[in-house]
Amino acid sequence: MQDTVKQKRLVELIVLFLFCPLLLGLSLPIWLKLSACVLALIYVGVVSFKLKLFSFKKLPSVPTVTAYVILARLVLFACISTFLMWKYAPDNLFYVVINTPKLWVTMSLVYTFVSVIPQEFVYRSFFFKRYQGLTSSYIIFAAISAVTFSFAHFFLNNTLVFILTFFGGILFTSSYKKHGSLWLVSAEHSAYGVWLFTIGLGDMLAFPGGPQ
């Protein structure tokens, strides 16, 4: 990639993935925040159309060993997070599932299709195609991807969310690089997010229905 193109792409990355998310977390008029987001999404949509990124791949055939690894780390995450909730916030554990199961089902579906899949399209499909050429080092690229993914959640103003989404960004970036599937990485992303909602941490992700 030529130096001039790299510089333009770098500026584009900073504006779209750092500046715009920061705007959402600042005390600014709502119309300004929404305008910036809409313009950014339109830009991403236009560029994605030109790059023909809307031809999604089907769910790949995942090797059995890989499937077990994906399942094992999800189970490990579920066990650790459930234990921590039981120890430090037992009243919140499975609160929504027990008290408002219909809300839990509805929000899990809305979260998956309205939030997760668009996020993964932008932060994996678009991000890889558009910015992987900025560096020859995958480690640096993965770090940049993880940082920008964390910044997407800046408006939630929660340090734990920032940390979790950073490591989530590394995990999802690695999964997408290995399998190249929007659907597989979206399924992983959704599983982790829905689980946090399930055990009672939905409020930090702006889910409704938690204990008052």
Image (cartoon, grey):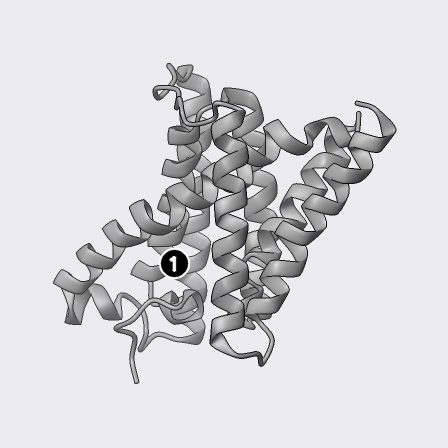
Q: Residue furthest right?
A: 3
Asked whether, in this view, residue 139 is left or right of residue 100, the answer is: right
Asked whether, in this view, residue 137 is left or right of residue 98, the answer is: right
Does 145 appear above or below 98? Answer: above
- The quarter of the picture where residue 72 lies is top left
Dot 1, how many residues are within 10 Å of its Cα: few (below 14), some (14-19), or many (20+)?
many
- The quarter of the picture where residue 186 lies is top left
Q: Position of residue 198 (x, y in %)?
A: 30, 59
Q: Nearer the viewer, residue 52 or 98?
A: 52
The residue lying at 79 percent from left, 22 percent from top is 1
Q: Residue furthest left?
A: 102
Q: Nearer the viewer, residue 71 or 177?
A: 177
The residue lying at 45 percent from left, 19 percent from top is 65
Q: Position of residue 118 (x, y in %)?
A: 41, 43
Q: How many numbered marks appear?
A: 1
Q: Position of residue 105 (x, y in %)?
A: 18, 55
Tell me the kind of residue under disc 1. Answer: Leu
